[in-house]
Image: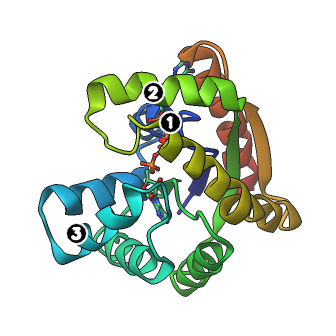
Amino acid sequence: MFNIILFGPPGSGKGTQSEKLVEKYGLIHLSTGNLLREEIANKTPLGIEAKKFMDHGQLVPDEVVIGMVDSYFDKHKDAVGFLFDGYPRTVAQAQALDKLLTLKKTEIASVLALDVTEEELVKRLLNRGKSSGRSDDTNEEVIRKRFSVYTNETSPVADYYKKARKFKSIKGEGELDEIFASLRQAIDKAMASHHN
Ligand code: B4P
């Protein structure tokens, strides 16, 4: 299996680039944000619980997200690999992911982090909020809260993977195709060393 993580702050383009990457590499797209929104749309108990956190720009509790990821992983046993989008977002989630992958005799090959300034992120999210109907994108206060959660809870995940020498920063501003090309270059390199 070949597994990568797409990392970065809210609105950095993880979802946007993931769609292109899974198509190119045939990986299974595991977006915790999408899975949670699906649970909300289906009004499941998990979705009803998750919505309370998401609407306030907070992270959904680790045990909920970790359980959801484990069961999604098990549903795709024959995958050539996974692209984790928006997961892990806490050090506890990163440790749980390592545990899961070790159990499945695989690992993370590389963590690609999209680097975008905060002004640009706010602009993108407010803009998406106009058409997406996502309640966490329409209110600037909720968006700012998501950034502070990112700084406090998610950025330590970057250090976790830096220590493991798996972390690579990618410029996340500019044309979509330019960013896609930089990601492809980093993935091709990681794939080449993965197969050696
Ligand atoms: P997510 O769904 O993961 O979404 P996100 O961080 O808001 O955005 P993403 O980076 O994917 O942005 P996108 O490509 O769409 O999380 C939502 C919420 O779910 C979290 O706040 C949290 O509550 C909860 N959650 C999710 N995972 C969790 C976890 N593991 N643990 C706990 N809670 C969790 O891009 C944004 C916009 O920018 C789009 O409109 C796009 O068109 C635009 N854009 C993209 N690239 C661009 C570019 N190069 N130039 C201009 N615009 C661009």
Frontmost residue, 158 versus 29 = 158
Residue at the image point whose x is 44% and y is 31% from the top = 20
Q: Amino acid at mark 3?
A: Ile
Is label 2 or label 1 in front? 1
Depth check, mark 3 against mark 1: the one in front is 1
- Please name the residue shown 16% across and 55% down the image: 41
Residue 88: x %, y % from top left: 58, 65
Q: What residue does disc 3 label?
A: 48
Could you give the CA–CA distance between mark 2 and mark 1, rounded to whole angstroms?
A: 7 Å
Local packing at callout 1 (Cα closer than 10 Å; few below 14, some 14-19, many 20+) is some
Looking at the image, do the residues carrying marks 2 and 1 touch, with CB atoms under 8 Å apart? Answer: yes
Quick one: SS at disc 3? helix
Q: Position of residue 125 (x, y in %)?
A: 48, 31
Q: Position of residue 27 (x, y in %)?
A: 43, 49
Q: Which residue position is annotated with label 1?
A: 140
- The residue that mark 2 highlights is 126
Q: CA distance from mark 3 to mark 1?
A: 23 Å
- Who comes first in sequence, dot 2 or dot 1? 2
- Residue 95 image point, x, y percent: 65, 80
* Amino acid type at image mark 1: Glu
Using the rendered image of the protein, determine whether residue 79 is visible from the camera's viewpoint.
Answer: yes
Q: Which residue is more in the foreground, 122 or 179?
A: 122
